[in-house]
Image (cartoon, rainbow, N blue to C red):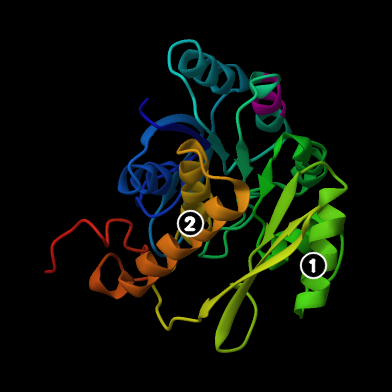
Amino acid sequence: MTATALTIAGSDSGGGAGIQADLKTFSALGVYGMSAITALTAQNTRAVTRVEPASPAMIAAQIEAVFNDIAVGAVKIGMLGGPPAIDAVAGALAGRGVPVVLDPVMVAKSGDALLADGAVAALAGALALADILTPNLPEAARLLGAEVATDGEIMADQGRALMTLGPRAVLMKGGHGGGARCVDLLVRAEGVTRFEAPRLATRNTHGTGCTLSAAIAAELAKGRGTEDAVRAAHGYLQGALAAADGLTIGGGHGPVHHFHAVWADG
């Protein structure tokens, strides 16, 4: 059967994050992608200038339309924006029985907020949707009302704390940390698995979180288990980051190179 994945997220007019990044990632990894758009954003590599949410009814209708016709292998959830969208997604996914990767998108690479303050509690209440939650360090701290983790022990502790809110696994992303190595920790009931890579010097990091969570969903859709899916997705993102400077897109934080293994050199 054809591997398929559904992304539920906001649209990025600049093409580097959100729905656009997710669909590029699915395609690069050999997975057929579908989408349910939660919001329109006017953004580029420099800033988010406008956000217009889709109605909860429209969000639910998109999800229903996909599930009513297409076998969905996995779901990735990204930008939700506010409690109405969170409730609509939670209701539309209830009882579906497919793997869900939840990326708690709160702030764009430009620093612009993508989740209203009042929505944090609602998002925390919806974490039971997630088979894998993929917060960066500031997002994890905000969900827990804690300080940002500064070492691996605190990262693991915060991952375990987030698991008590419902997710079956938490991938604590260390991109916001310091040092020459970037460390991600996959926290599960079975223990903690460490993923480590060199911290690459590039400004083209727009959409890294979207890309990683979409890649995990794609690998789950292809039948990989949790740890193998995260490992494969981690490797894919490192390749996309390493090739990112081969793209000249915009004047701010450009996108990673989703098709680094597909496009011919030059």
Give the residue drawn at x 82%, y 38%: 125
Residue that appears at 61% across and 58% down:
107
Q: Residue at x 24, y 72 (%)?
A: 246
Residue 213 placement (x, y as % from top left): 54, 50
Instruction: Check the image and report above or below for 51 versus 34.
Output: below
Q: Nearer the viewer, residue 125 or 75?
A: 75
Q: What amino acid is at disc 2?
A: Ala
Left or right, 159 with reference to 36: right
Identify whether 161 is placed above or below 55: below
For residue 88: magenta? yes
**Distance from Cα at disc 1 to Cα at disc 2:** 20 Å
The image quadrant that residue 155 belongs to is bottom right
Which of 202 and 69 lies nearest the eye of the viewer?
A: 69
Highlighted magenta segment, given as a residue range: 87-91
Q: From the viewer's perspective, is residue 234 above or below residue 90? A: below
Pointer 2 local density, CA inside 10 Å: few below 14, some 14–19, many at least 20: many
Q: Earlier in the sequence, mark 1 or mark 2?
A: 1
Task: Read off the residue under disc 1.
Answer: 156
Q: Is residue 17 left or right of residue 161?
A: left
- Which disc is residue 233 wearing? 2
Residue type at mark 1 is Ala
Which image quarter is the N terminus in? top left
Q: Main secondary structure of the magenta part?
A: helix
| Residue furthest top in the image | 68
Q: Is residue 89 visible?
A: yes
Question: Horizontal and vertical percent for residue 259?
Answer: 27, 56
What secondary structure is found at the residue carrying circle 2?
Answer: helix
